[in-house]
């Protein structure tokens, strides 16, 4: 297993202590593994019922895309009977990547289905073990359709923190959840262990996908130290915004759907410049925890 010695020692940085908590659903062994490796896999955390609201929100988005493509005369069939895993593939099979990218490489449309997934108690219980009971759902959540044959589906080695480099807080916890089983063929997540206690490493905007993803300059080292994380639908991979990670292209004939959700302690900046998050859990002021109606109205707390 690689250690921090694999990274230039100049990149190492003291990190603030994570809140010590005896609440939440993680065991002491799981918390220790997360602290050491920088990530934690929770197999089968969610069931299909838990995933259903997000799947419905994504299906509605795909229907909107189909309507737009049909209106624009780019398709003759909306493939309304196609499955959740294949409909987007069918819609874009005769179209180019730039047409796909007009709809975005990831989606962050406000929808009740996303709220219910972000606020799922099973996820919050795990996050509480890492950052305490006062949890704010960060506005930078994403739903990602990794479509076969679309270069944007491959996400290069990066740190999430590179998208908000001037932020002065830590940790922001990412909870990455696939909506279908993931493996090497359809583009599962890869991580570089023990990179979560580094400074923001140097990076650039990659150029081969046309999406301006950030990409670290240490990508060759990342390839050598990569750990592949195939997981089943509804599993969760937790890591903070300094953990270096990537995902590979989708080489199948169906969409590899995933969501990445983010959480932080409530005392940290709420990153309103990136959108609207919401108070997801509070043992101290439970009456202020946001309802779905609050979030859809652009409010991040419940007005008691």
Image: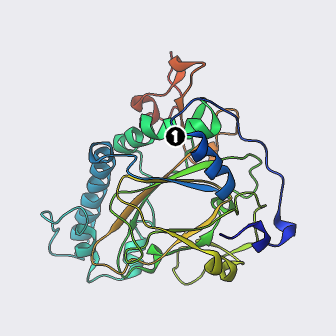
The residue most toward the right is 10
Residue 248 place in picture, x, y as percent: 48, 76
Q: Which type of secondary structure does the marked residue at label 1 adopt?
A: helix
Q: Quadrant of residue 17?
A: top right
Q: In percent of the image, x 32 and y 47: which residue is there?
A: 51
**Is residue 137 toward the left or the right of residue 179 in the image?**
right
Asked if residue 176 shows in the view, the reply is yes
Foreground of the two, 7 or 116 = 7
Residue 88 place in picture, x, y as percent: 27, 69
The residue most toward the top is 304
- Looking at the image, residue 190 lies above or below residue 22: below
Asked if residue 264 shows in the view, the reply is no
Tell me the quarter of the image containing the N terminus: bottom right
**Is residue 258 toward the left or the right of residue 93 in the image?**
right
How many marks the image carries: the answer is 1
Q: In percent of the image, x 69 and y 62: which residue is there?
A: 194
Residue 204 place in picture, x, y as percent: 69, 75
Residue located beneath label 1 in the image: 126
């Amino acid at each position: 297993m690689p250690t921090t010695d694999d990274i230039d020692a100049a990149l190492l940085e003291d990190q603030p202590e994570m809140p010590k908590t005896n609440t939440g659903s993680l065991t002491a062994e799981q918390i220790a593994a997360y602290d050491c490796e920088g990530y934690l896999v929770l197999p089968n955390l969610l069931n299909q019922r838990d995933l259903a609201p997000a799947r419905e929100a994504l299906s509605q988005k795909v229907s909107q895309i189909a309507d737009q493509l049909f209106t624009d005369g780019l398709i003759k069939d909306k493939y309304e009977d196609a499955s959740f895993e294949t409909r987007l593939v069918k819609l874009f099979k005769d179209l180019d990547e730039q047409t796909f990218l007009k709809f975005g490489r990831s989606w962050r449309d406000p929808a009740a289905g996303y709220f219910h997934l972000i606020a799922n108690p099973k996820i919050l219980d795990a996050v509480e073990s890492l950052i305490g009971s006062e949890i704010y759902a960060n506005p930078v959540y994403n739903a990602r359709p990794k479509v076969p044959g679309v270069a944007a589906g491959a996400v290069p080695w990066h740190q999430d923190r590179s998208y908000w480099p001037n932020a002065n807080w830590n940790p922001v916890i990412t909870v990455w959840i696939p909506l279908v089983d993931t493996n090497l063929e359809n583009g599962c997540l890869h991580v570089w262990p023990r990179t979560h206690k580094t400074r923001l490493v140097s990076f650039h905007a990659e150029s081969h996908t046309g999406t301006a993803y950030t990409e670290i300059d240490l990508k060759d080292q990342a390839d050598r130290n990569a750990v592949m994380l195939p997981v089943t639908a509804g599993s969760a991979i937790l890591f903070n915004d300094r953990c270096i990670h990537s995902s590979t292209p989708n080489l199948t004939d169906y969409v590899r759907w995933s969501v990445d959700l983010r959480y932080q302690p409530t005392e940290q900046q709420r990153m309103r410049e990136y959108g609207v998050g919401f108070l997801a859990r509070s043992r101290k002021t439970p009456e202020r925890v946001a309802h779905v109606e609050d979030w859809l109205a652009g409010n991040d707390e419940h007005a008691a």
